[in-house]
Image (cartoon, rainbow, N blue to C red):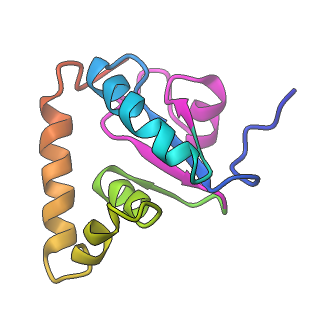
Amino acid sequence: MVSRTPTDEKGWVLYDGQCAFCISWVDRVRPVLERRGFQFATLQEPWVRDRLLLSDDAPLIEMVLLNHDGTRVGGGDAIIELSRSVWWAWPLFVAAQLPGARWFICKVYAQIAARRHCHISQ
């Protein structure tokens, strides 16, 4: 059995594999982030649900970044963290350090996530 831990790479980007919006986003960013050592998996995969302690009926409200050290961040914070690894997205990481900017980015992420067509997958 293959171990599904983020120790060999930078981490795992975990997303809702039943959401067309999420899948579309992953299709666009996967090549960029895979070149930088990130792997992708859906939040529906059994090993992911076990690792994140998600029940079968838990709503999937945000993407999760599971870092190589086992820490995890979700939503807008995950986007900010991922932006550190891409030169052209790095300004987002810098901007997030300004007072109120992280809150704003996370709020925008939450609004987009709440309005996706499949906003609560089962």
Magenta stretch: residue 85 in it? no
In this view, which residue lies farthest toward the right?
1
Residue 17, above or below 26: above
1 sits left or right of 75 in the view: right
Q: Position of residue 3 (x, y in %)?
A: 81, 37
Quadrant holding the N terminus: top right
Question: Quadrant of residue 73 in the image?
Answer: bottom left
- How many marks the image carries: the answer is 0
Q: Position of residue 13 (x, y in %)?
A: 50, 43
Q: Nearer the viewer, residue 94 or 67?
A: 94
47 sits left or right of 104 in the view: right
Magenta segment boundaries in residue numbering: 40-68
Q: Residue at x 58, y 23 (%)?
A: 45
Q: Residue at x 33, y 40 (%)?
A: 62
Q: Nearer the viewer, residue 79 or 64?
A: 79
Q: Nearer the viewer, residue 118 or 9?
A: 9
Q: Residue at x 22, y 75 (%)?
A: 95
14 sits left or right of 9 in the view: left
Residue 48, above or below 72: above
Q: Nearer the viewer, residue 29 or 100?
A: 29
Residue 61, above or below 9: above
Q: Residue at x 19, y 82 (%)?
A: 98
Magenta stretch: residue 50 in it? yes
Question: Quadrant of residue 16 in the image?
Answer: top left
Quadrant holding the C terminus: top left
In this view, which residue lies farthest toward the front?
88
29 sits left or right of 94 in the view: right
Q: Position of residue 103 (x, y in %)?
A: 17, 67
